[in-house]
Image (cartoon, rainbow, N blue to C red):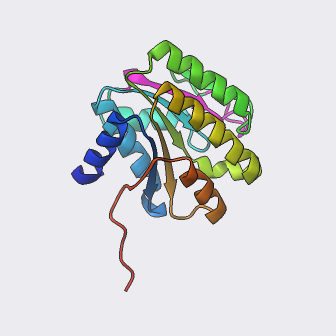
Amino acid sequence: MTDDYGKILDSALSQKQQILLRSDISNYEDDCIEVICHLCALKKNIVVITFGGNTRDISEILEYRKADISRVYYIDAISISQGKGTPPVKKVVTVYKPNSFEDINLYTMVFVRDLGIENTVVVFLSIHKLQEYENEDEIGFFLYYYTDQLKRLKVPKIILTHSGINYVLAQIISRNADIVIPVRKEKMVA
């Protein structure tokens, strides 16, 4: 993440905005890690909700990059359904199914309540994987309700997406964001 985009992100976080970060598909996983490292450096309490990446792998990469993961909490919505079991990671809650929206919402609110709203940020990773488990209408309703709750609490949310996601899902996600920030400069096609 460049300094310019980091400053834009920091400003949006200070304003408690609902943020959509767009990445190029080829850089998506690295950009996800970079954003979490950036939040760790800001000493934020981070609730990471993942629908794709294994929390153990994410945690190990963050540690390898020397990020202070003492404030990182996970809601893992994928490991059990993929047969990987509960990863041996501290501060992780595993949801039975990725489309268990009530559970995801409940666990998020428990983390937010316990961590306090002043310094907490919620981060969604691999939300595009939800289309394998739920239709777009249900995803849209969940995001609308979820975003509304976080806005009322003044807790910022970051959803990281990439250039390869379905157009309809991209529109649903962008409607639930106050600001859209590209993580890297888009490459111009000649």
Residue 64 appears in the picture as rendered = no
- How far from the left and from the top, in percent, is residue 48? 51, 33
**Nearer the observer, 18 or 1:** 18
The answer to if 62 sits in the magenta stretch is: no
Picture quarter containing residue 78? top right
Residue drawn where x is 73% and y is 53% of the image: 136
User: On the rendered image, what quadrant is the C terminus found in?
Assistant: bottom left
Q: In the image, is 93 to the left or to the right of 8?
A: right
The residue drawn where x is 44% and y is 62% is: 24
Q: Is residue 10 above or below residue 175?
A: above
Q: Nearer the viewer, residue 86 or 112?
A: 112
What range of the chain is rendered magenta?
Answer: 69-86
Tally of numbered tags: 0
Question: Can residue 15 be spotted in the picture?
Answer: yes
Q: Does the magenta-highlighted stretch encompass residue 81?
A: yes
Where residue 173 appears, as percent x and y from the top left, is: 58, 51
Please identify the quarter of the rendering in which residue 180 is found: bottom left
Image x and y of residue 140, in percent = 68, 47
Q: Where is residue 22 shown, x and y percent of the image?
A: 45, 56
